[in-house]
Amino acid sequence: MRCGGHTTCLMMKTLTEWGRALADVLMPRLCPVCGKALVADERYICRGCLAALPRTHLEEVDFNAMEQLFAGKVPVERATGYFYYQKSSPYAQILFDIKYRNRPQMGRWLTARAAGDLRASGFFDGIEVIVPVPLHPSKLAQRGYNQSDYLAQGLAQVLKLPIIQALKSTRAHGSQTRRSATDRWLNAQNTYTLRTSHSQQLAGKHILLVDDVVTTGATLEACAHALLAIPGTRVSLFTLATARLD
């Protein structure tokens, strides 16, 4: 819709702002970390909690802890997670809301911020395509969305890179949350395969594989192996969060 003039535009803007303010009073938007009501110019997380986000800065460290996790298992070019995940931390609620409380848009917004923050480090240099970790169709139907798709969209928005759904989950492997490291590895094996129609598109490309969180690395390892079966591919890893691996 186009405004009919400067005055009309100002009136529409004012009405929109009043509408948002009224909505915040009737149904206050809450910060998932501290639980306080967000003010009008705060999106999903309040300014204080966003400023205190436990950033990893792993992208600034040579052979960092996340890269070490995959050393000797799968050849990864680079790897980083945006912030640290601890189950007992209030920041864990961000991942829970994104994944289980129908708030994937918060994930897209936060990864867009991450792309802006990490860009100067050179972490994304040479990346040509983004591939999200897939969900099994049964889990996708149950949840209604794949959170990794939204995380990939946030990165693509800033980095201006294409997203290719190159992987598929061939069996529902269940939640990894309460499994041991060995069980997680066994659970992820033979779960992810390539969509053969995308193999030619990815041949020779540097791929950024994206997921929400890394703990043992079993899921990312299985997905990376599948992508590296394509001739000439290289794989780097980005997760919104990572457990402390050192």
Image (cartoon, helix red, strand yellow):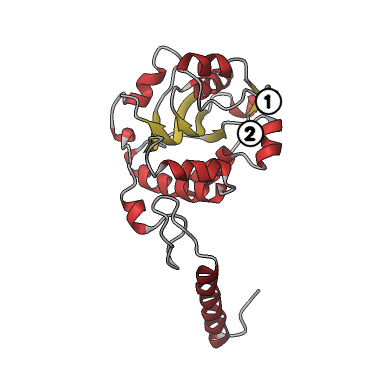
Q: Amino acid at mark 1?
A: Arg
Q: Which one is nearer the viewer's eye here, 72 or 207? A: 72
Q: Quadrant of the C terminus?
A: top left
Toward the bottom, the furthest residue is: 7
Q: Is residue 123 above or below residue 188?
A: below
Q: Quadrant of residue 124?
A: top left
Q: Which residue is mark 1?
A: 195
Query: Alpha-carbon distance for marks 2 and 1?
Result: 8 Å
Residue for point 55% across, 75% down: 19
Residue 36 at least partly seen: yes
Q: Is residue 4 above or below residue 19?
A: below
Q: Is residue 211 above or below residue 54?
A: above
Q: Earlier in the sequence, mark 2 or mark 1?
A: 2
x, y percent for residue 38: 43, 62
x, y percent for residue 72: 41, 12
Q: Which one is nearer the viewer's eye here, 157 or 51? A: 51
Question: How many numbered circles are shown?
Answer: 2
Q: Residues within 10 Å of mark 1 (few under 14, many from 20)?
A: some
Marker disc for residue 165: 2
Q: Amino acid at mark 2?
A: Gln
- Asked if labels 1 and 2 touch by Cβ distance under 8 angstroms, the answer is yes
